[in-house]
Image (cartoon, rainbow, N blue to C red):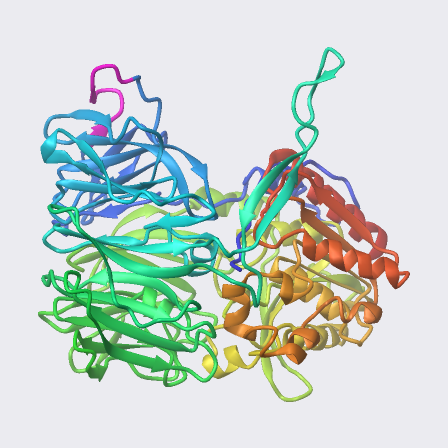
Amino acid sequence: MKKFITAALGMMLTLGVTSASAEITTSDIATSKYSSRSIGTITPLADGESYVKPDASYRSLVRYSFKDGHAIDTIFNIATARRAEGMNPLLSFSGYTMSPKEDKILIQVGRTKIYRRSFSADYYIFNIKNNTIEPLSKNGPQQAPKFSPDGNVIGFARQGNLFLVKLLFNNAETQVTTDGMPGKIQNGVPDWCYDEEFGITNAFEFSADSKILAYVKFDESLEGQYSMPMFQAAVKDGATTQPLLAGHDVYYPVAGSHYAKVNVHTFDIKSSVDRTLELPIDSDTYVPRIAFVEDDNNTLFLFTINRNQNLLNVYSANPRSTLCNLVLRQEDKYYIEPEEFLNIKFYGKRFIMPSERDGRNHLYLYNTNGQLIRQMTKGDWDVLSFYGWDEKSGTLYFSSNQEGPLYSDICKMDSKGRITRLSKKRGDNSAIFSSTLKYYIGTWSDINTPPFIASFDNQGKQITVLEDNAKLASDVKEAGFVKREFFTFKTVDGTQLDGWIVKPADAGTKKYPVLMYQYGGPGSNEVLDSWSSGFVAGGAFENMLLEHGIIVACVDGRGCGRHGSEFKKETYLKLGVMESDDQVEAAKYLATLPYVDKDRIGIWGWSFGGYNTIMSMSQGTPVFRCGIAVAPVTDWRFYDATYTERFMRTPGQNGEGYKASSAIERVKNLNGRLMIVHGLVDDNVFYTNSAAYTDALIDAGIVFDQHVYTGKEHSLVGTSTRKHLYDTMLDFLERFLK
């Protein structure tokens, strides 16, 4: 379960505005009036001096200089590229992939969603030298295409099967597998769980010499199949022109059930020999990553993790003999974060692996025999992002929170372990480095300042401002945004928690209702010194509520990230229990503030935040007057196996934990008026969660509000949908909080 929110259109409301400045409306928020500008998606090039990014219309790709940010040339233009015979003109593209030699580009046109990240699209091969463009395949849309290292072959998936296009043989298309069928067998592309919970869209790799293709085969035939209702009625001339009800099928393993059984194959591209590797795993083992060792065509690394996700085994496999040898084993008493194996970077015969083994996330250097060479970073702080390692000088580049859990900095560490902070401003700092680590594009913001983007050298010297968001800063000032303020407090057991609050200038002279916003999922953070903090970046949503006379506060409880693994994993086997206790403690603290009306405190959240809303209102302490739960989990037995079992194990192993973590089990303790919001075709948190919970509310005789959006998924995207949601939320708060 990942937090994601997408803005859509809203409408102007006139409920009790308290600010003298221009009114902030839901239309302003939903139409992204107060959104920051970025520089777009960039791809650093091999020369270390330049990068590529699309123009605003996605009709061309332009090369820019890292050093000064200036455009160098246009390497692709949709209007001037010479099309293959019979090929229709392209209006725009939606993505691109550079070939290893940077002489060709895969141009993506359109996309059809499969899962959260996975999609199919029509791809075209653009030859930079010849300025020609032609279809990758004429046999239907493609999924997850990838160049071989020599750039002469492109692999892709279609309907669960793998295909190869050989560019040196007149783009001849050959089929690698034949047993693929969505819902049964997927070759080289993931099922729902691997996509959603491991972030994987591609499960095949080429050897360094481009002669071997390795891929993961997913057998999802035992996964539960769920059909979600799609109401599609349309009437013309008095008759329906579409089915009144159609089903949208999803293969989704819930906690404790069967999920995809996997094995790993290798395919010899020249001889067409397919082999199954002798990987010693059981049917419940995950294989979330495979990777060929650089410059070693005979070594394929296989990363496996057990069902409880607390044991990581790394195998070295010979792609031809099929033999697999265990080279690394890592165990955690709780669970292993996916980032620990997904973010490993290879450097020839060595690799750098992040790990929380000492209680903080740090970097470790290994050789490809699995021998630990040394721990590279140490301290009571976390490596947040690993950017790269200059092997020659021994310099590491990464971001960390050495200044505290609310902050992040871009850092480098020399071969002697001396750390230099490259970012100069306190707040949220992130970077995109050039391929040679000579330059980086740095982005800085704090909780009240929009992102400032500039290019830097690797000493931290600013070169060129790329985007300062000055107009947004002016708009925010003109609208009278109130600055968010940080605070800390201690719970009854002495745990210190961080929070932020948005309150009016006259706070202290009168008392206001408070709405608490939270998420609370394992490892998440909502309280950061970053423009992105809050429901909508920049605090626009919170300022809108403030104009309606409602103070907004946010507190990160136990289970959140950046405080060490023990703090994060304290909620293990009992999700929602400590998290809801801490939201109750936060409400009690807020009630002591002189400008807060202790009898008018509400709480709301989305996804895990929706679950935490219900759990907090049902904790047993009547501190909340009302709450809004959007797309909530209500019982972890209804949620997916991969995410749930990482933190809860299976229902059979942890029955009491599942009971304690169930909002349904707490239904009779619900205090305050609750509104539940859910999309009927949510394929992340199934509507089953809300359906079961509302049944329990009805059985308990509890009055509640509910809004169901037909045809809408987890993020409730859609102009009229978001407009209606924001209107409904404000109306609910006006009636039950104010």
State whether residue 560 appears in this view. Answer: no
Near-viewer residue (143 or 616): 143
State whether residue 717 appears in this view. Answer: yes
Return the x and y of residue 560 as percentages of the image width and height: 53, 72
Picture residue at 55% right of the left edge, 39% below the top: 33
Return the x and y of residue 662 as percentages of the image width and height: 70, 70
Residue 126 falls in image quadrant:
top left
Near-viewer residue (105 or 60): 105
Picture residue at 48% right of the left edge, 44% below the top: 472
Residue 575 falls in image quadrant:
bottom right
User: How many numbered discs?
Assistant: 0
- Residue 503 falls within the magenta-colored stretch: no
For the C terminus, give its image quadrant.
Answer: bottom right
Picture residue at 69% right of the left edge, 26% below the top: 233
Report the span colored magenta: 74-87
- In the visual, does 537 lie left or right of 367? right
